[in-house]
Amino acid sequence: MSPDPRQDERDFLANYDPRAYDPVAVTVDVVALTIRDGALHVLLVRRGEAPYAGMPALPGGFVRAGGPRQGEDLPDAAVRELAEETGLEAGDPELGRVHLEQLGTYGRPGRDPRMRIVSVAYLAFAPELPDPRAGGDAAAAEWTDVAALGLTESGDQRPGTTRRLAFDHARILSDGLERARGKLEYTPLATAFCGDEFTIPELRAVYEAVWGEELHAGNFHRKVLSVPGFVESTGTTSDRTAGRRGGPRPRLYRAGDARLLHPALLRPGREELIR
Amino acid sequence: MSPDPRQDERDFLANYDPRAYDPVAVTVDVVALTIRDGALHVLLVRRGEAPYAGMPALPGGFVRAGGPRQGEDLPDAAVRELAEETGLEAGDPELGRVHLEQLGTYGRPGRDPRMRIVSVAYLAFAPELPDPRAGGDAAAAEWTDVAALGLTESGDQRPGTTRRLAFDHARILSDGLERARGKLEYTPLATAFCGDEFTIPELRAVYEAVWGEELHAGNFHRKVLSVPGFVESTGTTSDRTAGRRGGPRPRLYRAGDARLLHPALLRPGREELIR
DNA sequence: GCAATAGTGTCTGTAAGACAATATTTA
DNA sequence: TAAATATTGTCTTACAGACACTATTGC
């Protein structure tokens, strides 16, 4: 490496194609998912300005730069945006329980009418977080049932859907949901939607909410317990009565130490989708 | 939407946090993989300038911008970079057989010492492409055996490796290889490394090169034929003798119409990697 | 001829899914 | 008491992997 990075930088700025300096802005958008009342919800904000003023959008914003070695890393920007919109402090331990992963990057020319914007989308999975309105300066953000958005597999929204998403956020959310559905198959991600301790039926409710289909209780139960490291017993039983309509008290489990599920829990009935 | 996008743009540029306009450049980098002589190879260029002058790097370059609706989309930029470095024309039908997918985006501050750069990495799978040197103005690019790069699972290169990659390209390549290994399990991607017609042993050689382990010929053969839509018979046999050391002439197959393999071909012996 | 390989057959352990049975709880 | 639910058991079918076998080719 050259002994003088600033000289490098001057050479660099002087030499290469100036078209590359047409402004390109980099943003992060966050698809934050949680389970509320047994249904999958996504965090949406209401846009205050044009374009798409008044329409719901994914929380997001510009990545802070400031020089070659200054500014924030992309995952940090995603956490910051999530914290700002949920009203949680950036250092809140509640945020430590949130699983965050990069989803993909969207840069089609024209996706933002104001300027060329490349957006790095992140996917966040959280157990029930406080309602965004409770936070101090939290914007008009709220958890929205994804079923109400009428998303199709192709990333569009069905005609007649009242809550249309801004920009290409329907596509990004659609990709995020598909990623989440797939990850539930071969990782213990579903436990990230639960509290520290949870029952097998609660875990099954997570799978049913994300996959959108009912699962056979008995087979699911045996299967989860048969995957090494998926869950570990606490030896106690749940005394929560909310949502239960009878039957014995279910046992409580914690997340195990597995990072991959083997064998995987495959989604039923995907034969038609394969071709 | 506002009736005057240019007014939107002026408002936009006037109003928001100017720190976002600290220059951030967006590049694409391409992890192009192919099989040569039974070993997995990646396309690398030799850097001509500081930083990392003389060191091998992934092919890549700046995304062309030019205004809100001008410039190229990210996948187009990746195809352009790949075409430039391989010496193929951008419209060459040979490029149409290349499978391209987004790998991930890397934006850690300091990853490029000159300025803040966010790089969108793409993964390309191709059957044997012409040698880059054959192309007209092709840079000093060449296919490199990935085994010679001494990559570890953590994305570093083993001490003593002579060909050290520039920037964080060892990490990017490492992520690309892991993605490729995984995709071979549940998609028919391996056929993208083969010609139009191929034999089951050739297909097995692809799996062995990418996974880095030998597979049982008999079980692999039966398994491939049992997955619906993976391959379809041509009714002919291969008369190529290159690489074969005996035995009957293998039958020829084409890629089938499956987009997912069901059941999947799982990598053997991953029990240790699960925790 | 000899060694290597393509392709098929067989057997065993594991897993998925349908279904049933029992015990325990809420309403 | 009736209905719902947690948990376990049983059975069938499918599949992965180990191994064996035969036929066909290159050298």
Image: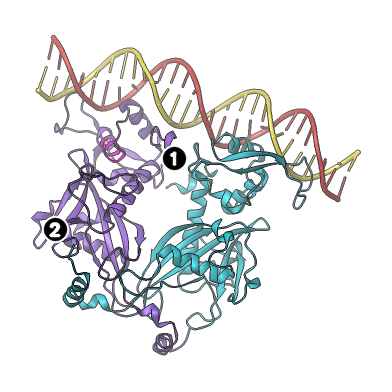
Chain colours: A purple, B cyan, C yellow, D red
Q: Secondary structure at mark 1?
A: loop
**Residue B86 on image: x %, y %:** 58, 68
Residue B193 magenta: no
- Asked if one can make out residue B153 in the rendered structure from this viewpoint, the answer is no
- Asked if one can make out residue A236 in the rendered structure from this viewpoint, the answer is yes
For image coordinates 73% across by 45% down, the residue present is B238
* Towards the viewer: A189 or B229: B229
Which residue position is annotated with label 2?
Answer: A54
Kindly check if marks 1 and 2 are in contact, taking CB atoms under 8 A apart as contact: no
Q: Secondary structure at mark 2?
A: loop
What is the crowding at mark 1: few (fewer than 14 residues within 10 Å), some, or many (at least 20)?
some
Main SS category, magenta section: helix
- Name the amino acid type tagged 2: Gly
For image coordinates 66% across by 55% down, the residue present is B38
- Name the amino acid type tagged 1: His
**Residue A147 on image: x %, y %:** 23, 42
Residue A210 magenta: yes
* Towards the viewer: B252 or A238: B252
Q: In the rendering, which numbered label is found on residue A262? A: 1
Disc 2: which chain? A
Instruction: Locate residue A104: give its quadrant.
Output: bottom left
Magenta part of the chain:
A205-211
Instruction: Locate residue B168: give its quadrant.
Output: bottom left
Disc 1: which chain? A
